[in-house]
Amino acid sequence: MMANPLPLFPLNVVLFPGMVLPLHIFEDRYRLMIRRCLNEGRPFGVLLIREGKEVGEAAIPYEVGTSARITRVERLDDGRMNITAIGAERFRVRRFRAGEPYLQGEVEPFPPTEGETPEARRWAEIVRPLISDYIGLLARAAGLQLGLVENLPEDPTALAFLTAIALQVSHEEKQRLLEISSVPDILAEERAFLRREDKLLRFMVETGPRLAELKAGPTGYLFPN
């Protein structure tokens, strides 16, 4: 369960449950926040920035995000840190709170719904071959060898979040997926994205350009540089 208030980290990334997030912590306010999270064994929340920048003045984030649990820490001599976190649970901010150098929020859980319904299973069967083909096309376009295609989850919720992570679409489109409540609706939206992106990728593979801006993430998923 997420404690209130939850420390919040506005970033130019949309974090999904199960997604690996490497971060370099260098600003004083976030050094303090991460130290407290480590000392108290608690997560922090990641929110996509709606307006503003990651560094400097406070940014205005979206209200729906995902909590992140720290799994690895590398402490540097000057106080900076390299950390790895894993996306855990979706949440919605009821109210932002001041009082600390970093942003905090009173949050409520925002779990996916209808993940075990026949409708979710039906949509999973539709999306599974599409995301398998899409990941294969990404690998060919980027010149990578990925083993993920043979290991797609059977669980509709896990498949929905994996697909959201793998999709190379805009931050705003990923945020739209994060804000959808039900698993069948997430999968339906992802099918539309996959159909659109499939056409672009096939053109790129057939005409020869390589996706040099893509790399394999720690889990084998593809992430932008």
Image (spheres, rainbow, N blue to C red):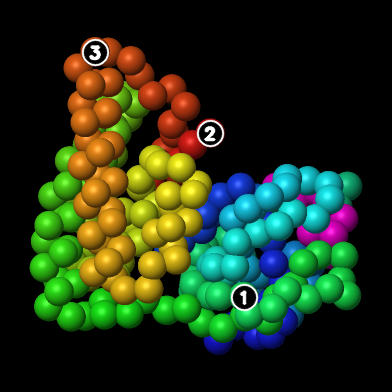
Q: Is residue 183 above or below residue 80?
A: below
Q: Residues within 10 Å of mark 2 (few under 14, many from 20)?
A: few
Q: Is residue 92 above or below residue 187?
A: below
Percent from the top left, x then y, of residue 98? 83, 73
Q: Nearer the viewer, mark 1 or mark 2?
A: 1
Which residue corresponds to mark 1? 93
Which residue corresponds to mark 3? 207
Percent from the top left, x then y, of residue 19? 45, 58
**How far apart in space, not on screen, are marks 3 and 1 (Cα)?**
45 Å
Q: Which residues are magenta?
A: 24-32
Q: Is residue 72 visible?
A: no
Which residue corresponds to mark 2? 225
**Helix, strand or loop at mark 1:** strand
Considering only order in the chain, which callout, 2 or 1, is on the residue closer to the N terminus?
A: 1
Q: Amino acid at mark 2?
A: Asn
Question: Do the residues bearing badges 3 and 1 touch, measured as CB atoms within 8 Å?
Answer: no
Q: Is residue 182 visible?
A: yes
Total marks in image: 3
Residue lying at 30% horizontally and 63% vertically, measured from the top left:
186
**Helix, strand or loop at mark 3:** helix
Q: Is residue 140 left or right of residue 39?
A: left
**How far apart in space, not on screen, are marks 3 and 2 (Cα)?**
23 Å
Residue lying at 18% horizontally and 55% vertically, measured from the top left:
127
Question: Do the residues bearing badges 1 and 2 touch, measured as CB atoms within 8 Å?
Answer: no
Percent from the top left, x then y, of residue 169? 40, 42
Q: Is residue 118 left or right of residue 109?
A: left
